[in-house]
């Protein structure tokens, strides 16, 4: 249906030059096309990754000048100009992104404003190449009708490319980073890298539009590329509806055509834009497309964020992200210890639990923590913690609130770097390496407050885990290459079967936002398992579950263990669950290991009773 | 007189209706608990009563005054405090500042001595917070943040306190402490609406109980009656450990 509508629109638009020879109409329609191309690309950055750029006029300018210089100064074919414009803008975009994306949110917006100003300055000052304030004249111009057709084709192509991207593993990765960069990193995605790619893609689109603009106009000067243009780009996108594939088109039509109706009011153009921006933020938080789209039962989005995405969750996500360790590479001493895996296989004597064939759990050690200490502002969260995690089975970590359990998980998964001590995974030192690296080595986790990717469906959440860092080429994703689609279908099938095993299949098509709290936790576990980890870290998976749901979780964990699932570290307060599923319990208090042993031994330990369980439990 | 009366309440998010007409009443100085599975609408009910969500239909009466549709800050000033699920503490401020902010909603007893005395009382309930009083709340562990959220709710000196899963993420020792604390608050005359997954403990504490399913009240009675109901026994008190601890 939507396809037919789009095709019809396209045909109608393509017929325009045949219906009217009026150059003014064609010029306005061409401008709509150019704005559509820019905003389609900007949508990849703003709509998909949630980052704001106020400097895309800079890339538009780079594209325009690249095309202008190619044909006027170098005398090359105009057909080379636009591809070169894309390449140059994307290359500059990648460099700028590498530097600018060290920061995100409002800071990134500031940095991109600065970038736009610098580009404008260079256009004015670098007279030999740019012609200075006068600009470049006599850029080859095809007849307006033809130029319009080319622009229309590129605009349609842009929308298709972005739609392809959204459906691909890349699209899911982008929205995952927007939803929770912490969770995305725990699945092996580098949020920084993913954002750089998004920024680069959006710069390339702006470059294409700039190149086309140069050939449409035949003349370019710095005046066209100021901050106001950047604001217009962003406004068109927000007004149309960011994150939605048709948003850029609608926003571009309205923001190009409307001012033309009000030519008498040209002086008030800025006031009009400002008012539109306010209108769209107050009354159309999801843009025109969001307001016009039929309300589906499951449609949630920003407007109705209620039960979901509570502030505490965000705060925690942020707190976690802030602590995110800078990638401190240690080129030395990475491989050398590979062979000497944690010597003394302490023959595990805990065959006391009747359930589960513990026999499979040979004494082999997967992960070794030695003397790990970590303090936050003088408070010791971990103090000389040593423990060994075997290659299979479930090990519980319990302890009073604030004992350092979550800190331990954060250290194991790379979100914190211990101040001292070592963490080795299969002999490889991992302490201080970034979370996505550790995730790629086979460590997956859940979070105390479930971090689901709200704008993705339940199925897509799991698909992000299945794909992990294997996203393929972003160009192939944009093009919707057949092999990308085939790989994607395989990913979706696998995700669905995982959901099925986790009892979430009926929710597959719902936005993850719409899941009740208990099911979100389950989704997180399924998603973590989708990475096929060797070690799964669970942070209070039973919190907020009803007794019946805890019983289900109990059965699920046992099934995981008996079917050769990963080794599990379980942080949990529900002692009945802990006792039922784990073979070994480590007790933390004030960051120290105060007891360690079989569940029965730990339960009888006086220190544990005193610090944690309270009187006879 | 009932401290809080809810009649025919419907509410939801966007186009999704969650509450399908909920009616309940809480007598002053008692504890009422709501039991139900995840997704039954318990949190939505508390949010609607506290003015965080706008009710679609129905009335909410607090001490004889209609508060349905009032914004949450005004509801808070009328003496109703919500301790939300997911904590919602102010992470960039210290624990002490969080607690003092809680006192802003109160109408009387705003003088430093009363506020100080209440601060002491809260720290008495949650000694773990005392050591971290001047540390940033964002640096607290998850369970400590939960305690802070409850304590901050109490600092408002509410007449009616809504607790959404106060035991979430607390160690067994603290779970017991927090339920003890709730019992003591009742003895001091506070009216409490308690939503809790640890149904056995909640029922042991409460005077009356309601069971919610799919946005409706499907069962109500004294907590003893509800506790003995076969359906509740099966669905919500299934696990022996919980029941054991409650005794």
Image (cartoon, grey):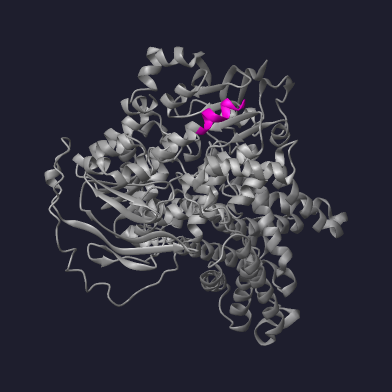
Tell me the chief SS of the magenta region: helix
Residue A586 in picture, x, y percent from top left: 28, 49
Residue A204 in picture, x, y percent from top left: 54, 66
Q: Which residues are magenta?
A: B181-190
Residue A338: in sight, yes or no? yes
A240 lies left or right of B204: right
Residue A406 in picture, x, y percent from top left: 40, 51
Above-or-below relation of A366 to A610:
below
Residue A488 in picture, x, y percent from top left: 36, 49
What residue is shown at x 35% (from left), y 18% (from top)? B234
**For residue B230, which quarter of the picture?**
top left
Residue A157: in sight, yes or no? no
A439 lies left or right of A242: left
Magenta residue check for A186: no
Above-or-below relation of A215 to A259:
below
Specify the quadrant that holds the C terminus of chain A: top left
Q: Nearer the viewer, residue B129 or A444?
A: B129
Above-or-below relation of B60 to A316:
above
Which residue is the extreme one toward the right?
A264
Callout count:
0
Q: Nearer the viewer, residue B33 or A27?
A: B33
What residue is shown at x 66% (from left), y 63% (from top)? A54
């Amino acid at each position: 249906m939507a396809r037919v509508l789009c095709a019809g629109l396209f045909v109608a638009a393509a017929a325009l030059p045949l219906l009217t020879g009026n150059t003014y109409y064609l010029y306005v329609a061409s401008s709509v096309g150019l704005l559509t191309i820019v905003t389609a690309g900007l949508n990849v950055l703003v709509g998909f990754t949630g980052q704001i750029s106020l400097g895309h006029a800079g890339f538009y300018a780079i594209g325009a000048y690249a095309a202008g210089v190619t044909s006027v100064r170098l005398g090359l074919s105009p057909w080379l100009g636009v591809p070169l414009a894309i390449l140059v803008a994307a290359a500059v975009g990648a460099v700028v992104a590498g530097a600018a994306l060290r920061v995100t949110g409002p800071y990134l917006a500031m940095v991109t404003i600065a970038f736009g100003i610098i580009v404008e300055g260079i256009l004015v000052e670098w007279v030999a190449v740019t012609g200075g304030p006068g600009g470049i004249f006599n850029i080859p111009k095809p007849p307006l009708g033809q130029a319009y057709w080319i622009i229309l084709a590129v605009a349609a192509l842009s929308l298709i490319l972005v739609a392809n991207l959204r459906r691909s593993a890349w699209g899911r990765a982008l929205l995952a980073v927007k939803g929770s960069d912490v969770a995305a990193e725990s699945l092996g995605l580098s949020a920084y890298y993913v954002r750089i790619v998004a920024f680069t893609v959006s710069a390339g689109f702006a470059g294409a539009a700039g190149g086309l603009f140069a050939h449409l106009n035949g003349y370019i000067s710095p005046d066209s590329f100021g901050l106001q243009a950047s604001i217009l780009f962003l406004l068109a996108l927000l007004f149309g509806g960011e994150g939605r594939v048709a948003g850029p088109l609608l926003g571009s039509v309205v923001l190009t055509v409307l001012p033309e109706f009000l030519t008498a009011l040209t002086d008030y153009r800025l006031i009009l834009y400002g008012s539109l921006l306010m209108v769209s933020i107050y009354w159309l938080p999801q843009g025109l497309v969001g307001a016009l789209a039929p309300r589906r039962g499951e449609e949630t989005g920003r407007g109705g964020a209620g039960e979901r995405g509570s502030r505490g969750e965000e705060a925690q996500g942020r707190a976690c992200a802030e602590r995110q360790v800078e990638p401190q590479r240690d080129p030395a001493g990475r491989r050398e210890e590979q062979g000497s895996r944690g010597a003394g296989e302490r023959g595990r004597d805990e065959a006391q639990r009747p359930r589960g064939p513990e026999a499979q759990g040979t004494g082999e050690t997967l992960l070794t923590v030695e003397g790990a200490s970590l303090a936050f502002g003088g408070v010791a969260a971990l103090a000389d913690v040593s423990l060994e995690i075997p290659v299979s089975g479930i090990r519980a970590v319990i302890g009073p609130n604030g004992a350092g359990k979550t800190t331990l998980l954060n250290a194991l998964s790379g979100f914190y770097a211990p101040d001292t001590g070592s963490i080795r995974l299969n002999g490889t030192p991992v302490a201080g390496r970034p979370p996505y690296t550790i995730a790629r080595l086979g460590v997956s986790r859940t979070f105390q407050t479930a971090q689901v990717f709200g704008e993705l469906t339940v199925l897509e959440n799991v698909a992000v885990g299945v794909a992990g860092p294997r996203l393929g080429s972003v160009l192939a994703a944009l093009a919707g290459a057949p092999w990308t689609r085939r790989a994607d279908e395989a990913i979706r099938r696998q995700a669905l079967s995982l959901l099925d095993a986790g009892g979430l299949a009926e929710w597959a098509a719902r936005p993850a936002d719409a899941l009740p709290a208990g099911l979100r936790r389950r989704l997180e576990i399924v998603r973590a398992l989708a990475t096929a980890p060797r070690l799964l870290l669970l942070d209070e998976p039973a919190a907020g579950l009803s007794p019946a749901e805890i019983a289900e979780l109990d059965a699920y964990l046992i099934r995981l263990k008996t079917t050769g699932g990963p080794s599990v570290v379980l942080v949990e307060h529900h002692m009945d669950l802990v006792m039922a599923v784990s073979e070994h319990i480590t007790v933390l208090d004030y960051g120290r290991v105060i007891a360690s042993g079989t569940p029965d031994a730990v339960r009888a330990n006086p220190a544990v009773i005193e610090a944690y369980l309270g009187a006879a439990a | 007189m009932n401290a809080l009366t809810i009649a025919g309440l419907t509410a939801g998010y966007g186009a999704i209706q969650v509450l399908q007409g909920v009616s309940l009443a809480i007598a002053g100085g008692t504890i009422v608990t709501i039991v139900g599975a995840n997704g039954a609408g318990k949190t939505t009910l508390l949010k609607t009563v506290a003015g965080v969500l706008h009710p679609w239909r129905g009335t909410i009466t607090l001490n004889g005054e209609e508060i349905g549709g009032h914004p949450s800050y005004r509801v808070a000033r009328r003496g109703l405090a919500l301790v939300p699920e997911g904590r919602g503490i102010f992470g960039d401020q210290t624990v002490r500042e969080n607690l003092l902010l809680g006192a802003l909603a109160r109408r009387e007893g705003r003088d430093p001595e009363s506020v100080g005395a209440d601060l002491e009382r809260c720290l008495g309930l949650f000694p773990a917070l005392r050591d971290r009083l001047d540390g940033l709340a964002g640096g607290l562990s998850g369970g400590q943040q939960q305690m802070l959220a409850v304590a901050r709710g109490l600092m408002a000196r509410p007449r009616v306190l809504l607790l959404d899963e106060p035991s979430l993420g607390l160690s067994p020792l603290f779970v017991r402490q927090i339920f003890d604390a709730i019992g003591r608050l009742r003895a001091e005359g506070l009216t409490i609406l308690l939503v809790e997954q640890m149904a056995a403990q909640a029922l042991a504490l409460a005077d009356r109980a309601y069971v919610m399913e799919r946005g409706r009240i499907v069962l109500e009675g004294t907590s003893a009656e509800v506790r003995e109901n076969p359906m509740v026994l099966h669905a919500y008190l299934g696990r022996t450990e919980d029941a054991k601890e409650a005794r």
